[in-house]
Amino acid sequence: MALQAGQFVTRNGQDLYDPTTKTPLRFASFNTPELAYLDDPDRLVPLLYEQEDLLRSVSDFGGRVVRTYVLSVQTKGDGVYDNGGNSPPTKHIIKRRNNSTAPAGQVFDLNEPLMRGLDNALAAAGRMGIRIIFPFIDQWEWWGGCKQFVQLVDPALEQTAFFTEHRVVDQFKLLIQAVLNRNNTVNGLLYRDDPALLAWETGNELEYNKGRVPTAWTKDIAAHIKSIDKNHLVMDGSWQFGWDATVLDDPNIDMYSNHYYPGFMRTTTKTPQIGGIIALAGVMILGFLLLILVSCFSHRFRFLKKPTMYEHVYMESKARKRITMAAALVIIGGSIGGIAVLNRNNNQQSLYGDLAAEDAAIVASHNKVYIAGEFGLAPSAAMQSMLTTAVDQPSKGFAGALVWSLRGHSRNGGFYIHSESGEGYFSYHYPGFPSTGPGFPADDISTIKLVKQAARDMAAKTGYTIPAPTVPIPPSIIASVSTTQDLRFMGSATASSYEIQRADGANAPATANWQPVKTDFLDNITQNSTMFKDTTAKAGTTYSYRVRAKNDVGVSEFSNVVSLVG
């Protein structure tokens, strides 16, 4: 359902409300970091096909909301950083060009080609009824973040100046103003008037000296956003270190979030269990020592001139020795069992749901909305813990949970994939695929199923009707690079498999004798890799090829026809 002008998501205390569907807004969905900017393997503006592919996938399972990634920031060494030339690098926020038309005093420009990628993403989301959470800037340097923004203002300043130096804060406010007042080149709407935006997030995983973001900065930036844009919600972009009451009670901040990963831990109600684990480990070690001494030494150490403290133990009768050994084994076994139980309860991944529930309760106590803005890099059981908690909503204000991350089809065939920093986890791909190729995780199918079910459960609780699934759009064969030994095509959102057909001769019409050469082809292939090899094609013979996509609903129309020589 396309979003109409003025249909902004609103907050009433702990609840979000969607005026388009006339239902409370609760969601289980994904982060889509490449919706507006491709970063892996190349930094590119996505094609509209690639953006719509992601959004169709989210719409199919009823996700309702996605979270993009940040505006990238030019870094020293990017393009013509130092001389302000007119050929900017592929970053959103760039050093002011010599021919800039930006207001006087502004040290940066917005890179127009990349901003048009964001224009397309917002317009496509509006057409498909998907809401977007948009964080302005990153704490980290992956795409350029706070540190790089500070360097645009004054290279001599440290990263912490992002929150404390008035010159940097003023430039960040100018950035916010430029983005909110941008006129979308696709739909003609100012960003501040675009209903596809759910919330502006002050940043991604913001922190200050490995602690809380300064309260004054958060309040100042939230007030600045609201002074320009009263239509959209504002979400705090800090993480890990909680919030003070002043921030939680700020009338300009509507939503709060946290991110949950194996490397993230903070004090929780279960933290005392760590002490129990340490104590039991000590008891277990003592049990092992007792067992070794009793079972391995039948006489005292000869190199000592006087009896050891264990001499009486060694000289015990066989019966007492057996009793002591049994007691040692009981101590060891009990310690191991206790450690296993406490470790299971204290396992950070299993705590995803517990951690989020505690955060949500804190936010709800201040009558605000909470979401799990990112979570992942964990087994399916941990993912289910979070999604179950979000669905059950132990605190009324727990509005949604967003998995990291969903990647879509590529213009070069196959899917974009992303490895998560050596953690052994990869991005997910809809509608879920077996792990038969590099970049497709073993939990691809199971995680997609978990998110789909959570979205359905939330829809049932709120009265939202998930749009009926449809057959896939037709795939498109990439004629410019295809051969009989590498037939490449741009895949179809929601397609589970494809049928590839061949006919003799060039440009075969629909009435030709088309025959399937592959009936259940999976495109779970890394982008720009070899796709389908026609091993039965004869050298020097011309063939025509076409492809159609399949899912649980049915079969798509056929793709374009291409003629290839074997």
Image (spheres, rainbow, N blue to C red):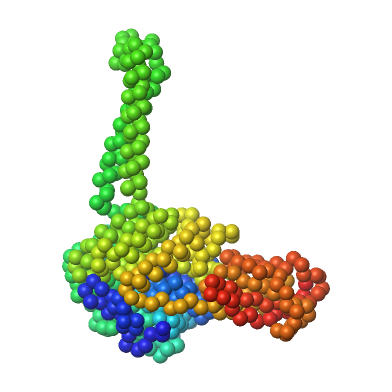
Residue 371 visible in the snapshot: yes
Q: Residue furthest bottom?
A: 188
Q: Residue at x 33, y 42 (%)?
A: 341
Say which of 270 and 213 sits in front. Answer: 270
Locate residue 167, reporting x and y percent: 28, 74
Q: Quadrant of residue 531?
A: bottom right
Where the C terminus falls, by quadrant? Answer: bottom right
Q: Quadrant of residue 526?
A: bottom right
On the rendered structure, is 387 left or right of 438? left
Q: Quadrant of residue 285?
A: top left
How many numbered badges does the structure rendering display?
0
Say which of 438 and 85 sits in front. Answer: 438
User: Where is 450 relative to 468, above or below?
Assistant: above
User: Where is 314 relative to 22, above or below?
Assistant: above
Q: Residue at x 59, y 78 (%)?
A: 556
On the rendered structure, is 393 left or right of 451? left
Locate residue 142, reporting x and y percent: 43, 65
Q: Residue at x 63, y 67 (%)?
A: 520
